Amino acid sequence: MAGNQRIILAQRPEGMPDENDLRLEEGPMPEAQDGQVLLRTIYLSLDPYMRSRMSAAKSYAQSVEVGSVMEGGTVCEVVESRHPDWQAGDIALAHTGWQTYAAVDPKGLKPLSPDDAPISTAVGVLGMPGFTAYVGMVEHGRPQAGETVVVSAASGAVGQVVGQLARHWGCRAVGVAGGAEKCRFVTEELGFDACVDHRSPTFEDDLAAACPSGVDVYWENVGGKVQQAVLPLFNEFARVPVCGIIAHYNDTETPEGPNLLPAFMRQVLTKRLTVRGFIQFDHADRRREFFKTVAPLVKDGTIRHREDIVEGLENAVSAFQGLLTGKNFGKLLVQVSEDPTRK
Amino acid sequence: MAGNQRIILAQRPEGMPDENDLRLEEGPMPEAQDGQVLLRTIYLSLDPYMRSRMSAAKSYAQSVEVGSVMEGGTVCEVVESRHPDWQAGDIALAHTGWQTYAAVDPKGLKPLSPDDAPISTAVGVLGMPGFTAYVGMVEHGRPQAGETVVVSAASGAVGQVVGQLARHWGCRAVGVAGGAEKCRFVTEELGFDACVDHRSPTFEDDLAAACPSGVDVYWENVGGKVQQAVLPLFNEFARVPVCGIIAHYNDTETPEGPNLLPAFMRQVLTKRLTVRGFIQFDHADRRREFFKTVAPLVKDGTIRHREDIVEGLENAVSAFQGLLTGKNFGKLLVQVSEDPTRK
């Protein structure tokens, strides 16, 4: 066995993270101590939240320390077990970060069976992103049948599920995505009622035309110009679950004017909007309910999903850069090593 | 009897309304038809919401039409009744606007007795502003004992009640007001735990010092720099009932940068804030509960209040201008004619 390939946070990025911030290095092969298991990473999940973990600024979770392996959700295979409950060949959902191997206490691991669902879905449609979509809609979006739900980053890991749940619950689902190909996927493959290309010069008009009855729920993944286009379309008592503001994650200073905050507050006031930031781990008590509700919908094809799998840990940084600029097409994963469950 | 003095919306104001927009004129004396009463205005309530009624822009209520008498809540005396339920000398809460007389169908009138409370309170602490405070806190602020509640425009009609209710419910109440005299009143007369002068050069630091445990509820009356000073102080899961954004009511264009919206959204996301616009009339079902709860607190002195009474309808426009710039000190009223219940 060679050493452990790992990507460490070498320094805190200013703006877009690059290979100087996230440095690939080879470390010693970890060894499983008594009670531990040695894991080989099959899939590393890349998610927008990771950008804030790279910064020192206070957020809802601890920053990654400079010099540490960058954190992240993973799907792993047990290569050696020194714990009675696990054996070599078992597949597990883990959080071992941007590296090829890790030796861990198996307490935090969740066993996965390829018979239930493709193992990669444990960090996608049936994992954190899917749960984010579900709990944000149930707790904060609260869509009623017949309402219009606008979903930014509609072809992404979370957005895909948000819109399909909205449809499943009887709403009109309108996606916003970048480019004709993504928009076609969102309507034709995922079954959204409409999808609008935010790169189009007629984007604002296109969005208004796609929402003839106004907007009752706006799923905020991005901020920026998509948010601005939705703002005049809100119906009274609309809800805005704020899941992310990816357009601003690399901001290094307060953006130039004009100052759009007063106009935003005016809409909040006159339309009586509810704008609610949230993070899935605040609602951990709904995880079982999520799985019971959504896993059958995935199995029977009601909820479809698309993965964007990048080969090799050495490509993780450029893949992550692409995630922050919308280059990915579907749930972004890095295939770090072979998936023994895929033929 | 002379004619009817009235202030009409002569044209829609650009920025701060003035006498060209709100024109005092003399009209014919209205006459009560069969089934109507003729009302003499004693008090005209001046409230910030009136600014948006002067604009054509869509808001939660119909704009006043150009050429019409400016609308507003009033406390009136019946001078002539052609309705069996009312007689001359009765006092009523009405909505007859910026004029000295009006002939109306009494269906929308609420009888007032000076034995219950001073009649002016029907447009103040026991009227729309007091109800706004109560319902905004109960429905949207949802303060828990021990939490810190920051109240902008703390010496104003709504703010006074918000902070005293917060205290009554076991919270720490921190006011923000303009000038040392108002701040002294807010702490010494109203009993807030602290009050910070937003005109002070050390305002941000003063506010932080007054909130050693952070901010759990921010009552938004103003927007602008007060909002900016509160933003870094929010605790997780803080609530922001948005009652008004008076700092921006006269904006004629989108303000210059920097663009403060992304930083605001970042706080919403990472602190999981709930920002909720509201208007009291959406919660009319709580009016009785409000009165039953708050009237005894006013009677026994738990909730105190201050009125700022300007004499004469001819001074209404300048008084309203002062309201939009914080010149008033307490609930602003115009005394349009003599109050027969005050000796």
Image (cartoon, coloured by chain):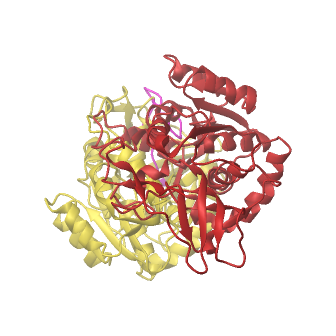
Chain colours: A red, B yellow
Q: Is residue B226 left or right of residue A49?
A: left
Q: Position of residue B340 (x, y in %)?
A: 40, 63
Magenta span includes A115: no
Which quarter of the rendered picture does the N terminus of chain B lie within? top left
Magenta span includes B65: yes
Q: Position of residue B180 (x, y in %)?
A: 17, 66
Q: Is residue A170 left or right of residue A220?
A: right
Name the residue rendered at 76%, 62% in the picture. A289
Name the residue rendered at 52%, 25% in the picture. A198
Q: Is residue B118 left or right of residue A300?
A: left
> Bounds of the magenta span?
B57-77
Visible residue check, residue A184: yes
Q: Nearer the viewer, residue A34 or B47?
A: A34
Q: Nearer the viewer, residue A9 or A136?
A: A9
Q: Residue B119 appears in which quarter of the rendering?
A: bottom left
Indicate whether B298 appears above or below B79.
below
Q: Residue furthest front?
A: A1
Name the residue rendered at 27%, 33% in the picture. B19
Which quarter of the rendered picture does the C terminus of chain B lie within? bottom left
Q: Residue B251 appears in which quarter of the rendering?
A: top left
Magenta stretch, overall SS:
loop
Q: How many marks?
A: 0
Visible residue check, residue B41: no
Q: Nearer the viewer, residue A225 or B160?
A: A225
Q: Is residue A235 left or right of residue B59?
A: right
Q: Residue furthest left?
A: B201
Q: Residue B100 appears in which quarter of the rendering?
A: top left
Q: Position of residue B70 (x, y in %)?
A: 42, 37
Q: Nearer the viewer, residue B73 or B37?
A: B73
Q: Residue furthest top?
A: A201
Indicate whether B168 appears above or below A217.
below
